[in-house]
Structures are given as C-alpha cells and as structure tokens.
Amino acid sequence: MKLLGEHLLDEEHVMIRETARRFAETEIKPNAMQWEEAGSYPRELHRIAADTGLLGVGFPEELGGAGGGALHLVMCVEGLMRGGSTGVTVGLGTHQIALPPLLHIGSREQQQRFIPAVLRGEKLAALAVTEPGAGSDVAGTRTRARRDGDHYVVEGEKLYISGGTRADELMTLVRTGDDPHGGLTFLLIPRASEGVQVSAPLRKTGWWASDTAEIRFDQVRVPVERRIGPEGAAFLALMRNFQMERISLAAYGVATAAIALEEAMRWSRERRAFGRPLTGFQVTRHRIADMATTVESARVFTLTVAAALDRGEYRVREVSMAKNIAARAAVEVTHEAVQLFGGLGYMRETLVERLSRDARLLPIGGGTEEIMKEIIARELDLRGASR
Ligand SMILES: Cc1cc2nc3c(=O)[nH]c(=O)nc-3n(C[C@H](O)[C@H](O)[C@H](O)COP(=O)(O)OP(=O)(O)OC[C@H]3O[C@@H](n4cnc5c(N)ncnc54)[C@H](O)[C@@H]3O)c2cc1C
C-alpha cells in the first residue's frame, strides 16, 4: 500500500528505506521467530548491518557514518521493522541513543576513539540513564561519581538498559554535583570494568530479541578522560538526545501500526465466516478503514515533524505530539488486528500477536505519554504546566 507522505522524501531517504528493508528481509525475517523466542540475536548481525551502512545513519562521514538526519533515521526504522522483530531493530539501534552525547559534547579525540568502532559493528554501545528511583524524573538520578585523582569512583544502579547485557560501552548518567539538573554528567564506562555487575536479561512483555539489563556500579573506577563534556553538561545533552530518540520511537509506532494493518487486511480477505470473507461484514470494513486512517495520520505527522527537524526548526512540542500519536496508533491498530485474527491473533505464531506486545512499550519508553503531554502543555505556555 502506498502511504501518504512520500512527497517529503528524496532519493536518499527512499534508498535508505530500501537498503534497510532488503537487509531486514534477508537477514532478520527468516530468523525473527527463533531470535524472539531465544531472547537474543547473533552479535555478528551488527557487523553485517554496518556493511550496508545502516548503523552509520545520522553520524558524520568523517567518523565512519553515512550522514543524514531525522527523516533518514525514520526511514531506516521503517525498513528494518519489515524484519518483523521490534527487538532486533531496537538492538541494532541502541548506539543511536548512546553515542549522540559524544557528538554533542564529546572531544574530537573521544569521538574518533569511540564512534567509528561502533559504526563498524565491532563494539556495542548502550545508554544508561534510568534508575530504580529515577525514570521520568531524570533530576532524581542518584548514581554518584566521586572524583579521586585522575579517576571517578562510581556507585549506584541503572535499570531497563537496552543492550545492557552485551554492550561494550555504557554511556552512563551520573551525579557529580548536587544541583538537580546542573549536577549531572556523562561518563562512558566500559562494561568490563571491575565493579560493574550486569543482570541476566530482564523478562519483558515484548521486544524479546532485545536484551534489557539492570546494572550495578560498585566502586567502579573510571578514568577522567572518559568523562564526556564538562561536569554538569549532561542534562542539556540528554534533552537534545530525546528529540531524535522520540522521533525514532514515533517511527517505530508508525511501522508497527502499518505492518499490523497490512496483516489484518490480508487475513480479513482470506478468513471466511458465515459463508463470506471477514471483509464481507461492514463492521470489518469499518474497523479496517479506521485502522488505515490512524496509520496514515500518524505517518504523515511523524514524517512532517522529522522533515522540520532536518530543516533545523525548533519542534519540541511536535516531536512530543508525534511520539504520542504514533505510540497510540501502534497500540490501537495492533489491538484491532489481534481482534480480527480471533484466536489465532493470540497465538505466538502470528506477527500481530508479537506486534501487539511490542507496541505496549511505545507510550512508556523514551518519555511516557504523560511526560509528553507535560512537555506539550509547557510548550503551549499553559500556566503552571512546567511546575
Ligand atoms: C523495554 C525497555 C527498554 C528501555 N530502555 C532504556 C534504555 O536503553 N536506557 C534508559 O536509560 N532507559 C530505558 N528504559 C527506561 C524508560 O525510558 C523508562 O521506563 C521511562 O522513562 C519511564 O520511567 P519509569 O519506568 O521509571 O516510570 P515512572 O517515571 O515511575 O512513571 C510511572 C508512571 O507515572 C507517570 N508520571 C511520572 N511523572 C509524572 C508527571 N510529572 N506527571 C504525570 N504523570 C507522571 C508516568 O507517566 C507513568 O505512567 C527502558 C524501559 C523499558 C521498559
């Protein structure tokens, strides 16, 4: 189905989507079921993805990247999701949230030391921000880094870290000062450091092929040269990070809903009940019409916001809206798709069953639906909204 919004794309965007789709159909799709059930995929997949240039999307060419901005990233997600595994797509993309602080506040030397190896698929990187007591409220970060000569000594705990069980480098938010926001700093901590204790992958509702970890830092000594930017610079870097993370999560939502819609249409034409295909019932046709309307609206909005970001516009309000619209679209459309599949939609063998579980994270991860609304309200300058 040709969806609205293609006019926002140039040849390069389309090429990235096609490359990602080809990679997904040959490398992910045939294995998706097995990797999802195993809760993991081969690390080697990062090297194969790197060879196609997909890991480098959004990173400068001089650091081994492929260049491009938000729309390139959205197209990359759209293509990769055709593999049928949100977990693998997320796993291949953890560096997209882990490395940007290096780009924004890291030194040239740090960028060259750490970024190219990840974009070649040789090393994996994860972002460690959330803590047991601090999710939405980043200013509540408790993991402490105490200066001791030319090292920091890190003590604390991180939770729900995507890729955390096998990432080589952990972009870790730590507290170096008491100011709620101004006391936050990024340290790039090797997972192999003494005192880093990583849990077994956490058992989740969806995103099975992506590992999610709890990580404890017990008196971990980190050389000062692994501090990214000056002390206290992390909060602003993280806010910049969030814009790209949220528009890419919107892309996950759009792709999830679009695939669920296609599956539902195929099935509704095939499946017969009471002597006719499901599409023979008006209730089915209307349900699918609503699903298609939701998908198209979410996609056009997401692509429009991504294009505005690429023009350098300030679109914090619209990024938050896009994330909410697309996350809702994914939850609603997958719910309807499962309903159309009947009992089969509740079986692990169907893609809609997996997508419906995967979709549930979208209104939670990367800033919850409620936090997005707080941001929208603040950007609308509503009295008291930011308090
Ligand atoms: C599968 C998975 C992968 C993840 N990957 C990563 C990762 O790679 N790195 C990382 O750092 N984190 C990661 N996270 C963490 C994720 O970003 C957080 O779960 C999310 O930000 C919400 O934080 P929380 O879970 O602590 O919920 P809380 O902040 O405790 O929120 C609980 C509820 O309270 C609501 N709430 C909180 N504050 C307000 C408010 N001011 N107004 C109204 N309602 C409010 C929330 O909206 C939510 O409904 C991941 C989480 C999951 C589940």
Image (spheres, rainbow, N blue to C red):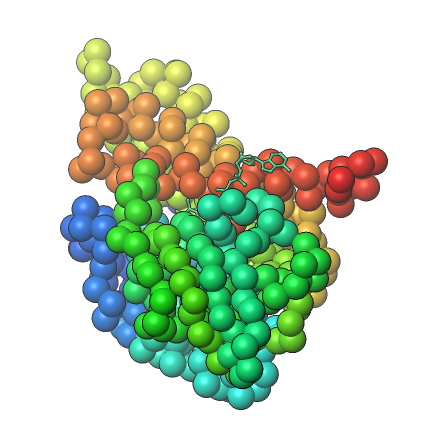
Tally the marks: 0
Quadrant in which residue 371 is drawn: top right
Q: Is residue 45 above or below residue 273?
A: below
Q: Quadrant of the C terminus?
A: top right
Q: With 301 as the anchor, is 210 left or right in this view?
A: left
Image position, residue 358 (x, y; %):
36, 41
Front residue of 262/136: it is 136
Question: Height in image: 144 above or below 81?
Answer: below
Residue 291, horizontal then vertical, whole percent: 45, 31
Q: Residue 228, how many percent across, how many down?
A: 57, 75
Name the foreground residue: 147 vs 60. Answer: 147
Position of 323 with respect to 266 (left or right) is right
- Can you say which quadrant of the picture contains the N terminus? top left
Query: Splitting the image into 4 quarters, where does residue 369 fall?
Result: top right
Residue at 64% from the left image edge and 72% from the top image edge: 231
Q: Residue furthest top?
A: 274
Give whichever of 322, 360 is nearer the camera.
360
Q: Can I make out residue 381 in this image?
A: yes
Residue 75 visible (yes or no)? no
**Residue 214, percent across and down?**
37, 53
Please indicate whether residue 178 sits to the left or right of residue 42 in the image.
right
Say which residue appears at 23% left-offset and 56% top-offset: 40
Q: Picture quarter containing residue 287? A: top left
Residue depicted at x 27% and y 72%:
48
Tell me which residue sits at (28%, 34%) in the image. Answer: 353
